[in-house]
Amino acid sequence: MSVTNRQREVAELLAHGRDDRVLEVGYGPGKLIALLASAGTVYGVDPSAEMRVQATARNRKKARTGQVDLRLGTADATGFPDGYFDGVISVNNVALWPDLEAGLRELHRVTRPGGRLVVAWHGGTKPSRITRRLRLPEPMLSRIQDALAGRFEKVDRHELRSLTAFRAYKS
């Protein structure tokens, strides 16, 4: 996972600051967590206990100081209070959520007014040979964009190098 994802590009879409609280949904081995934690406090939820072990090991020092807080959870059940996060990000797992609408409802709930959500999946302008096969068909991408637009004030689409990403703003 950490090899096929271009983390910096997608992190820049989130545009978070030092005082922001950020949530990563589906943190996997924790590569993006490490990047995001370089500029603030980062929380994460992932359904896999094995990924929690790997991500915690990768971010051991920052986890000990409380700058990184990794938990078991899912997009539709984060366990955090309303409006807790300035930014929420999900990379390469939205197509695996059992219920897109329930996941977006939960992520909208935990995003503060004025906050942003970034949802990305394999694709982009120059996907690798491996990830090219994982691209979502346009009807599925449109479904994600429409579901975001039904909950968030503004949604824009970005074709990054190896990801198709949507950025949504909560009013």
Image (tube, helix red, strand yellow):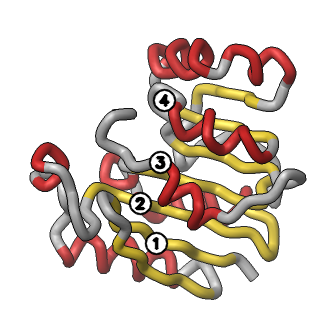
Type of the residue with mark 3:
Gln
The residue under label 1 is 166
Gap between marks 2 and 4 measured at Cα: 18 Å
The residue under label 2 is 120
Q: Secondary structure at mark 4?
A: loop
Which label's residue is closer to the chain start, 4 or 1?
4
Which label's residue is closer to the chain start, 2 or 3?
3
Which label's residue is closer to the chain start, 4 or 3?
3
Type of the residue with mark 1:
Phe
What residue is rendered at 25% in x and 70% in y?
125
Task: Name the foreground residue: 72 vs 11.
Answer: 11
Q: Are marks 2 and 1 in contact (CB under 8 Å)?
A: yes
Type of the residue with mark 4:
Pro
Gap between marks 4 and 1 measured at Cα: 22 Å
Q: Position of residue 33 (x, y in %)?
A: 61, 36
Task: Name the foreground residue: 99 vs 161.
Answer: 161
Type of the residue with mark 2:
Ala
What residue is rendered at 46% in x and 72% in y?
166
Quarter of the image with the N terminus in it: top left
